[in-house]
Amino acid sequence: MASQQNSKLPKNAALVHTFLAKHGSPASAYEILDGLRGKGISAPPTIYRALDQLLARGLAHRVESLNAFVACDHPAHDDANGFAICQDCGSVREFTDPEVVSAVNALAKAQDFDVRHVTIELAGQCAACRDSGSEVSHG
Amino acid sequence: MASQQNSKLPKNAALVHTFLAKHGSPASAYEILDGLRGKGISAPPTIYRALDQLLARGLAHRVESLNAFVACDHPAHDDANGFAICQDCGSVREFTDPEVVSAVNALAKAQDFDVRHVTIELAGQCAACRDSGSEVSHG
DNA sequence: GTGTGATTTGTTATGATATAACATCACAAC
DNA sequence: GTTGTGATGTTATATCATAACAAATCACAC
Ligand SMILES: [Zn+2]
Ligand SMILES: [Zn+2]
Ligand SMILES: [Zn+2]
Ligand SMILES: [Zn+2]
């Protein structure tokens, strides 16, 4: 249900996508704004509109628990993706897992609920932080 | 990992919990505040502190995708719960599902990620709204 | 190229959510 | 009664998001 739109990406959406891709970790709308001042972008609505365009195309995701946004690693997935968020270093890894997807779909069916969008976010500690004693800087 | 604290619930936390339980559907911190003015509560920090106390005890949950809070139906669960959120009528049903829990745990283990908290939120349409043509009022 | 409508963008202002900082109060422990 | 801890009150501010309207741009038919 994602990334099916082949129409050309508007200029600001492309700017935001490039910024997010380079950024790597989640960025808030205002962090994106600060990063793109001087490129003709000067106000929040411009960022939020560009983000909406990216979200609609599956080229970015909103991380609900952080009020932040990430570029999508692999837009081929079909909307049932998730994020592992390290609370120590701020890293976010996107994943898609068929077991989780099928479990969620079975549950929704059992509950007679018509799912349009799935949010799965794991907060915790990544392997790198555990191995290093979790003193990595926040991002 | 939830509801293990038996110490007496502070006054404001009890007020907020009662409000949420009566409310039934998710309420924002400011909706709670408006509902509790006149009971000695007059500013946001009081609400957020009470909510923190409830969250720590497992007596309430934050619904990330709504920036809102709900009283917990069944504090016996062990942190791996989820919500089915109807985008048409605003109803929210909390669920706990062992299949989803085990799938998430297996995934986290495979990714070498130490999970502290799991957020699962399904957005879509509830059975009542589908059956009635989805014209139910928002709440 | 011109008209036309749809989309995108710029801009100002405001709404909605959440926390910092600091003073005070309530209560139990000693 | 002093001390320590948790809870509360209060003001101000930080952070996240959208409403509303005007202007520019694009796509496409003619
Ligand atoms: Zn993705
Ligand atoms: Zn980490
Ligand atoms: Zn619960
Ligand atoms: Zn419904």
Image: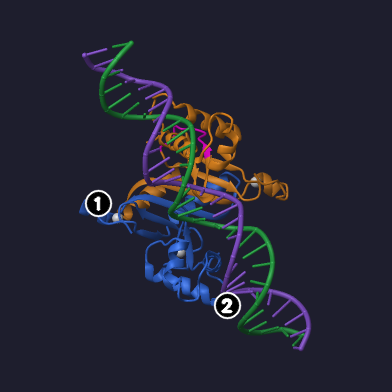
Chain colours: A orange, B blue, C green, D purple
Indicate yes or no whether the magenta region holds residue A71. yes
Indicate yes or no whether the magenta region holds residue A116. no
Whole-percent x, y for residue A60 in the image: 48, 36
The reply to whether the C-beta atoms of the residues labelled 1 and 2 are less than 8 Å apart is no
Q: Residue at x 47, y 68 (%)?
A: B75
Residue B72: tell me if it is visible: no
Whole-percent x, y for residue B79 in the image: 51, 61
Label 2, residues with CA under 10 Å away: few <14, some 14-19, many ≥20:
few
Q: Report the number of numbered marks.
A: 2
Task: Choose between D16 and A20: the one closer to the eye.
Answer: D16
* Magenta region: A70-78
Residue A107: tell me if it is visible: yes
Task: Choose between B98 and C3: the one closer to the eye.
Answer: C3
According to the picture, the residue beneath numbered tag 2 turns out to be B7
**Location of residue A22 (image quadrant):** top right
Q: What separation in Å lies between label 1 and label 2 (alpha carbons)? A: 44 Å
| Image quarter for ligand 3 | bottom left
Whole-percent x, y for residue B81 in the image: 46, 58
Q: Mark 2: which amino acid?
A: Ser
**Location of residue B97 (image quadrant):** bottom left
Label 1, residues with CA under 10 Å away: few <14, some 14-19, many ≥20:
some
- Of all chains, the one bearing label 2 is B
According to the picture, the residue beneath numbered tag 1 turns out to be B134
- Of all chains, the one bearing label 1 is B
The tag earlier along the polypeptide, 1 or 2, is: 2
